[in-house]
C-alpha cells in the first residue's frame, strides 16, 4: 500500500505508509535457548546489477565493521549470513545498496543443522533475525516520488542513538536515519501552502480556506502546518508535543551528479529495533539472534557511516 495524497476530504484520516517486511523472530516463551557452540560466519553474498566500485567498497566496509563488533566477532549460538546488493534506482537517479545481516539460531539436535568437521563451527537453521542497512533507498519513508507534491505526516522522532535520529512511521519498526549534513529528505509544508492546496482542490473547505488565507498576517502563513485536532479547524497549529506536521518529499534531496555516492542511509532490525532495550530478556537469552544483533547494533559506531554520507 502506498502513501496517498491528503485531500480536504481526508486530511484527518491516518496516512497509509508502505509496510516493509523483514524476517525476524525472537525466542517464543518456553523455547530452548540456542546451543552455545561456535557458529559459521559466511562470506557476504554479493549481487551486483550495476557496477559502482567505490560504493561497493564502502558498504562492504560497513558490513565488515558490524561483523567485527565484540558481539559478532566470535559467534556463539548463531551463524551469520550476510549479503550485499548493488542496483540502479532509475527513479531517483542514484545507485542503491542493501546490506543484510541475518543470524540463524543453532540447535545441534536439529537434523538440518550442518557442522564443519574441520573447524567445529555450526550453521544455524530457521528464519533468525535480520538487520537491514538501506543506502539511497526510501524504505521506511515510502515516499511516492512519482507525485512530488504528495502530503504526508512527519515521522515521529522517538529518540537519538549515538547522536543520530531514530524515527517511527505509524506503528512500523523504528529506523535510524542518516542524512546529508546540508539537506533533509522532507520539508514541512507551510500554512499558506496548505490553505492554497485546499483552495486548489476544491471541496467543502475550499471557501473557508480561501478566506483564512486572505486573513493571514505577520508571517503567519510561513509557519508550519499541522494536522487539525479540532473539528472546527481547517489547519491545526503546531503547539504542544503531540502536533503532527504536514510534510512533502524533498525532490531535490538526491544529487544526480553523484549517482554512486552514499547520500541517504536507513537502518532497522526485525520487528523491534531501536526500542528501549529489555535488559532482562537479553540476560535471559544471550544467544538469541535478536539479542546478538541488538548488541552488535549498540556496539557499532554509526558515526563512521555518517561520515560517508555526501
Image (tube, grey):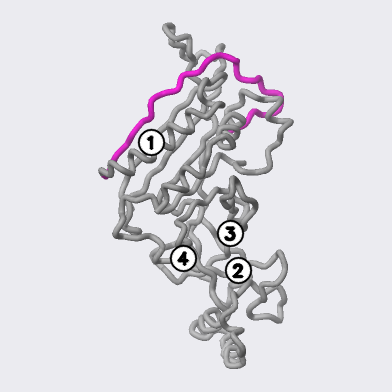
Q: Mark 4 points at which residue?
A: 249
Q: Distance between the residues labelled 1 and 3?
A: 29 Å
Q: In this view, does 285 lie above or below 244?
A: above
From the top left corner, tell me how far across and down residue 194 is, in percent.
55, 79
In the orientation shown, which residue stands out farthest toward the left?
51
Query: Could you tell which of marks 4 and 1 lies nearer the N-terminus?
Result: 1
Q: Distance between the residues labelled 2 and 3?
A: 9 Å
Element under disc 4: strand
Magenta run includes residue 46: yes
Q: Magenta span covers which residues? A: 25-50
Q: Name the residue under label 2.
A: 245
Query: Could you tell which of marks 2 and 3 lies nearer the N-terminus?
Result: 3
Query: Could you tell which of marks 1 and 2 lies nearer the N-terminus?
Result: 1
Q: Mark 3 points at which residue?
A: 155
In the image shown, does 290 or 6 lie closer to the viewer?
290
Q: Residues within 10 Å of mark 2 (few under 14, many from 20)?
A: many
From the top left corner, tell me how far across and down residue 43 is, in percent.
38, 25
Q: Which residue is drawn at 59% across and 51% down?
A: 166
Q: In this view, does 184 lie above or below 198?
A: above
Query: Could you tell which of marks 4 and 3 lies nearer the N-terminus?
Result: 3
Question: Badges 4 and 1: C-beta atoms under 8 Å apart?
Answer: no
In the rendered image, the quadrant that contains the C terminus is bottom left
From the top left corner, tell me how far across and down residue 232 is, in percent.
71, 81
Q: Distance between the residues labelled 4 and 3?
A: 12 Å
In the image shown, does 65 or 172 lie closer to the viewer?
65
Q: Residues within 10 Å of mark 3 (few under 14, many from 20)?
A: some
Q: Which residue is drawn at 32% across and 46% down?
A: 87
Question: Badges 2 and 4: C-beta atoms under 8 Å apart?
Answer: no
Question: Badges 1 and 3: C-beta atoms under 8 Å apart?
Answer: no
Amino acid at each position: 500500500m502506498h502513501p496517498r495524497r491528503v485531500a480536504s476530504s481526508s486530511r484527518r484520516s491516518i496516512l497509509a505508509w508502505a509496510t516493509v517486511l523483514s524476517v525476524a523472530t525472537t525466542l517464543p516463551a518456553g523455547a530452548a535457548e540456542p546451543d552455545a557452540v561456535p557458529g559459521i560466519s559466511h562470506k557476504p553474498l554479493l549481487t551486483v546489477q550495476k557496477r559502482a566500485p567505490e560504493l561497493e567498497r564502502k558498504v562492504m566496509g560497513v558490513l565488515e565493521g558490524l561483523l567485527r563488533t565484540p558481539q559478532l566477532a566470535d559467534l556463539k549460538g548463531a551463524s551469520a549470513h550476510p549479503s550485499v546488493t548493488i542496483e540502479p534506482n532509475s527513479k531517483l537517479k542514484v545507485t542503491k545498496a542493501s546490506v543484510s545481516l541475518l543470524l540463524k539460531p543453532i540447535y545441534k539436535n536439529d537434523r538440518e543443522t550442518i557442522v564443519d568437521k574441520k573447524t567445529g563451527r555450526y550453521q544455524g537453521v530457521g528464519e533468525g533475525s535480520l538487520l537491514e542497512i538501506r543506502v539511497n533507498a526510501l524504505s521506511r519513508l515510502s515516499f511516492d516520488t512519482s507525485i512530488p507534491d504528495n502530503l504526508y505526516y512527519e515521522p515521529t522522532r522517538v529518540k537519538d542513538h549515538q547522536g543520530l535520529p531514530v524515527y517511527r512511521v505509524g506503528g512500523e519498526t523504528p529506523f535510524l536515519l542518516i542524512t546529508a549534513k546540508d539537506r533533509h529528505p522532507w520539508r514541512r509544508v507551510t500554512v499558506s501552502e496548505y490553505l492554497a492546496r485546499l483552495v486548489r482542490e476544491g471541496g467543502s473547505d475550499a471557501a473557508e480556506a480561501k478566506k483564512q488565507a486572505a486573513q493571514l498576517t505577520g508571517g503567519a502563513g510561513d509557519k508550519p502546518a499541522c494536522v487539525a485536532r479540532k473539528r472546527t479547524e481547517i489547519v491545526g497549529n503546531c503547539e504542544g508535543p503531540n502536533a503532527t506536521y504536514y510534510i512533502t518529499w524533498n525532490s531535490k534531496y538526491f544529487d544526480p551528479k553523484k549517482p554512486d555516492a552514499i547520500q541517504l542511509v536507513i537502518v532497522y532490525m526485525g520487528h523491534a529495533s531501536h526500542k528501549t532495550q529489555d535488559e532482562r530478556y537479553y540476560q535471559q537469552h544471550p544467544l538469541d539472534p535478536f539479542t546478538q544483533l541488538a548488541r552488535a547494533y549498540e556496539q557499532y559506531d554509526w558515526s563512521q557511516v555518517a561520515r560517508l554520507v555526501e
